[in-house]
Amino acid sequence: MTKADLIENVYLKTGFSKKESADIVEMVFDIMKSNLEEGEKIKIAGFGNFVVKEKATRRGRNPQTGDEIEITSRRILTFKPSQVLKASINNEG
């Protein structure tokens, strides 16, 4: 599913215009993005959690040369689905 598909579904299910539906989808994504950039957790009941985690600096190896390199610290985004979503995907509910 693409963003265009989401917009189309919002348009069909709400009766808003396509422009209004696109604005709504964009607003939701912008809110989620800004909260994640600030390191906040997003918890959507019945769907799952989006969490930004900090990865520390660590040693690694260049697979081509075997040289040791330093992998810099960074932030990663993780998603953990809720039990409800897992059950739904596995046709258990």
Image: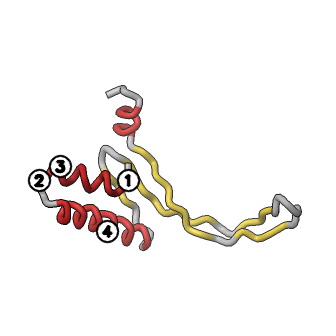
Q: Quadrant of the C terminus?
A: top left
Q: Residue at x 43, y 72 (%)?
A: 37
Label drawn at residue 2 = 1
The Cα–Cα distance between marks 4 and 2, rounded to whole angstroms, is 23 Å
Q: At numbered mark 4, what does the secondary structure look like: helix, strand or loop?
A: helix
Vertical position of residue 29 compared to residue 80: above or below: below
Q: Secondary structure at mark 1?
A: loop
Amino acid type of the residue tagged 4 in the rendering = Ile
Secondary element type, mark 3: helix
Amino acid carrying label 3: it is: Leu
Q: Is there CB contact under 8 Å for labels 2 and 1?
A: no
- Indicate the secondary structure of the residue bearing disc 2: loop
Can you identify the residue that label 4 sits on?
A: 31
Q: Are marks 3 and 2 in contact (CB under 8 Å)?
A: no
Q: Which residue is mark 3?
A: 12
Q: Which residue is mark 2?
A: 15
Q: Earlier in the sequence, mark 2 or mark 1?
A: 1
Question: Is residue 45 shown left or right of residue 50?
Answer: left
Kindly report the distance in space between the C-alpha atoms of the residues bearing marks 4 and 1: 18 Å
Q: Please say if the residues under marks 4 and 1 sit with CB atoms less than 8 Å apart.
A: no
Looking at the picture, how far across and down is residue 75, in whole percent? 55, 67
Q: Amino acid at mark 1?
A: Thr
Q: Nearer the viewer, residue 72 or 18?
A: 18
- Dividing the picture into quadrants, the one containing residue 69 is bottom right
Q: Residues within 10 Å of mark 3 (few under 14, many from 20)?
A: few
Mark 4 vs 1, N-terminal side: 1
**Do residues under tags 3 and 4 come within 8 Å of each other at their CB atoms?**
no
Task: Check disc 1: other Cα within 10 Å, few if <14, some if 14-19, many if 20+.
Answer: few
Q: Nearer the viewer, mark 4 or mark 1?
A: 1
| C-alpha gap between disc 3 and disc 4 | 23 Å
